[in-house]
Amino acid sequence: MDQKRLFVAIAISIGILLAFDALNRPAREAQRVQQQQAAEAQQPAPTPGPAGPLRAPTDASPASGTPTTPAARLPVEGPRVQGTLSLRGARLDDLVLRGYRETVDQNSSLVRLFAPREGGAPYYAQWGWTAADGRTRVPANDTDWAAEGSALAPASPVTLRWDNGQGQVFEIGLSLDENYMLTAEQRVRNNGVEPVQVLPWSRIRRESTPPTQGFYILHEGFVGVLDGRLREETYGNAKSEAAKRSGAAFEQETGAGWAGFTDKYWLTALSPVDPAQRYRAAYRHTTEAGPRGPEDRWQVDFAPVAPQSIAPGASAANGIRLFAGAKEVRLLDSYGERLGIPDFDKAVDFGWFYFLTKPFFYALDWLFTIFGNFGVAILVFTLALKAAFFPLANKAYKSMSRMKILGPKMQEIRERHKEDPAKAQAEMMALYRTEKINPASGCLPILIQIPVFFALYKVLFVTIEMRHAPFFGWIHDLSAPDPTNLFNLFGLIPYDPMQLTHYLHMPAWALIMGATMYFQQKLNPQPPDPIQAKIFQWMPVIFTFMLASFPAGLVIYWSWNNLLSILQQRYIMALEAKRGGGKPGLAVPAVAKKG
């Protein structure tokens, strides 16, 4: 019965991993194709051109007409970003990230975050006002702003100014830090003779549905922490919710908080400067006519819950922050602490194992600062994990080693009581008690390894610090699958078997992992049931094919963990063999014959 429980526990673990692989294998193949396409194509840089009409999020004045002159642009130059801001409509719609490229090739294009409406996938941030009193003239989407300053840079803030000709002056003060945070202060001066009421707003808008990785364990789409709660919506769910509500897909009144769009590695998010002020945040989806028919539009916006009432001679201001950059964990932590942005690190999808995943990341990142290589950091981290669980694993390996030594006696009991299984079970339990063996203890190393496996997988998969991180030899990206393939003799044959089917991928590190798993399995006692024994024999093969398309860093971890387990188990077996008078080895002890 205990052997059956052990088998069931292992079978469930295998089932979880197989289901995990089945869900994510097509998405991993799609990611590979996207990476290849990214290496071949680069979105062209924006060029000045007419900006068409665009509806504002809070019923701002529509564009009065299609401009015939190109929009003026303000350069944006930071240590980690570069691009331009369109002075028509006050849109930051051109931004690339310095230091991040599309592929591991250093000549590949920089990662583009924001793109203008003249391109194929418009994506931008914008600031504006709504006339809450219904009569004040506010900036429109085709309004040309005047800029005070030649370029927006960390040491060079810029002010955009527009006079409505009715006594009100609108200003947007922009400042950029050394990383990815831009702060916008929206100001209105009322030089008229009557009070006015306006509602400032800010938004991030995507005018096409972005390609997503499609992984079950990765969230992409709307994300935010509003009133202390994480709010996530996929593009599909947001579209459905918007249709049901005939309006916003999601709305939430909040104080301190943030909301935006998350991709696998990149984030754009808005956050109020004053956490004491109440705002209304919204996730929106609309369908608008496009050159190829109806097209999806996605938007995140923030606006104060009440309009600003500005008396004659007075002014009002509203501050909003825009993060547009890479989801670097320590940078997000720093912003959260310094600027009071709650749970900003949750932009990184650490998942259900957050309590393991984030500490794992910190440990690996710390080891990286020591060794300068994330692959080496993984090896050292695995060694530390083995040391931490050494007593528990030793207990399990001792039990398994004793069971292997006692294999002939257990088989003899089964043979002797073939007709009476209950009697055989009772004698075996008595033998377990005499030899102080716990058959179920063999499950412990596997049960411990499963959450560690998923947590480490998350670290390798979702943290940008692992992106394009090299190891040694042919591994140039630990977050991507091993590029070698047995089916083309590891590159000797100039043919990519993956063009035929993605299942024809058998890299070198997966074979190493399979071999270590095979030898580790030989150290364990064989199940008495022939069917169970056959299934166990196929486990290394199953895992080899299953992990072939997983990130190389994860396969390296598994291989190294197997090797350490083999060494530890061999050591325990040697001690137990001396204790029991036997000899350690890979072969299963011979079964004693009757008579």
Image (cartoon, rainbow, N blue to C red):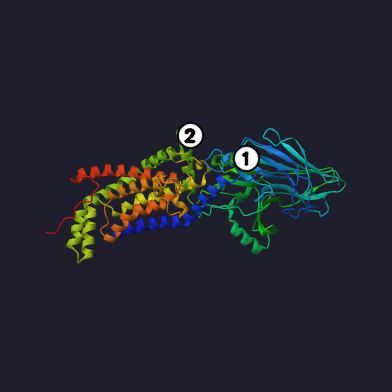
Q: Which residue is mark 1?
A: 180
Q: Nearer the viewer, residue 100 or 569?
A: 100
Q: Residues within 10 Å of mark 2 (few under 14, many from 20)?
A: few
Q: Nearer the viewer, residue 184 or 239?
A: 239
* In the image, farthest residue toward the right: 193
Give the answer, above or below, for where 587 lies relative to 423: above
Residue 244's disc is none
Q: Could you say which quadrant of the image residue 552 lies in?
A: top left
**Left or right: where 314 falls relative to 485:** right
Label 1 Cα neighbours within 10 Å, binned few <14 / some 14-19 / many ≥20: many
Looking at the rendered image, the quarter that the C terminus falls into is: bottom left
Q: Residue furthest bottom?
A: 419
Res. 274 image quadrant:
top right
Q: Residue at (24%, 42%) from the top-left corner?
A: 575
Residue at the farthest left position: 595
State the quadrant of the N terminus: bottom left
* Residue 558 position within the rendered picture, expressed as x and y whole percent measured from the top left: 39, 46
Residue 165 at what x, y percent from top left?
A: 86, 46
Q: Amino acid at mark 2?
A: Thr
* N-term-proximal mark, 1 vs 2: 1
Instruction: Name the amino acid type tagged 1.
Output: Tyr
